Amino acid sequence: MSSLGTEILGVIFLLVGTAATFLMFYQWGFPYDAANHRSQAPPWLNRSLRILGYIYLFIYLYMMWAMIPRLWTYQVELPARTVAHLVLGIAIGAILVIKISVVRWFKFLEKTLAPILGVALFICTVVLVGLALPSYAREAYLHRAAFSPERRDQLQGLLERAGLADAAQRQQLGSVEDLQRGREVLLDQCVQCHDLRSVLIKPRTPANWRATVERMANRSIFVAPIDDDDQWRVTAYLIAISPSLQKTVQLERQQQQASSQARLAVHDAQNRSDDYDPAAAREVFEVLCSQCHDLADVDALPPETEAELHELMERMVENGLEASEEEMAQAMRYMQETYLQ
């Protein structure tokens, strides 16, 4: 199944599970006939729950049918996220078996166990989909840029850096068809040994992508071999999405730098030994804090320790607080004198 199909199926699975759970809550608000083991909820409600249950079961069986055969092709230790997917998938299966058994053959347990099992299914479903969808959604977002004419033109020179001397082959690899095939190899074969997130976590140089693909292909030769043409196709696709990966990494790096600068600024402000004027410090405090929120917010939930004060100031700087070192020192001293005494 394509990446888009996987995303759609995952969303449907989550929506069906959510709808079934809340309809179940509504159903159990009606009286329960303990003698006949039957809810007195309206027939339409019972039918709706039954239909949603069948849909949920069908999607689950389809996903497990697609997942379990892939497990046999792993040649390295399963990635942590794959282990989590597997554990959740097995847990959902076990809960489904118990719930179906209770509803069909052990009705005397239905009133007690059915709501608990339904909630457990919902929780497992949310966690399972929550672990899987973000990586596929990110890849779906990244691949759009890879097919743009500008990126495909740029790819020609990058493939040469990766060691591909044949200009005609570079031109072919830059076609939409070959890039699409490279994406299919990534989503169908590369993820047999790697979690998709681990592939997309950071960009690489063209030569590094080529070396990585060759190394991984050599490991898969006995189970899911990737021929040389497909190796170049997936290499081309990974090179094509690398600029978008780089933007993500740069953003994360900027956020880390901003956090480090905030801590340094707060540390420097704390170590200043300027004369303390309570009235002037209060004025600075009011000006700085009112840039983003009401002063009453600070009074309602003030810092109670030095650690909380430092964390508060660092967060303010990260959020865009504009202040000199002297102003931050005055504001911190004012809060120390006002809230920490």
Image (cartoon, rainbow, N blue to C red):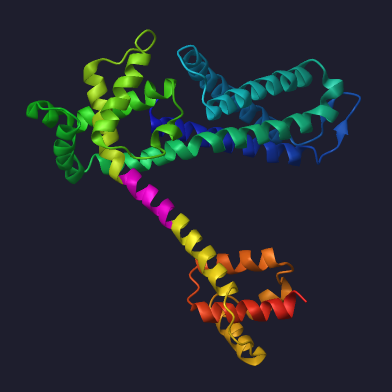
Q: Is residue 60 left or right of residue 301?
A: left
- Toward the viewer: 52 or 93? 93
Q: Is residue 243 left or right of residue 132?
A: left
Q: Which image quarter: residue 307?
A: bottom right
Residue 289 visible within the image:
no
Q: Residue 295, position in %: x, y?
A: 64, 80
Residue 181 in the image: state x and y as whole percent: 26, 26
Apparent side of residue 222 relative to residue 301 in the rendered image (left or right): left
Residue shown at the point (62%, 30%) measured from the top left: 52
Give the vertical position of 121 relative to 300 (above or below).
Answer: above
Q: Residue at x 70, y 36 (%)?
A: 45
Camera sees residue 179: yes
Where 127 sits versus 58, above or below?
below
> Magenta stretch containing residue 253, yes or no?
yes
Residues drawn in magenta: 244-254
Q: Main secondary structure of the magenta part?
A: helix
Query: Can you say which quadrant of the picture contains the C terminus?
Result: bottom right
Dividing the picture into quadrants, the one containing residue 191 is: top left
Residue 11 placement (x, y as % from top left): 51, 37
In-front residue for pair 17/188: 188
In this figure, what is the number of numbered marks?
0
Q: Check residue 167 for magenta coloring.
A: no
Residue most toward the top? 222
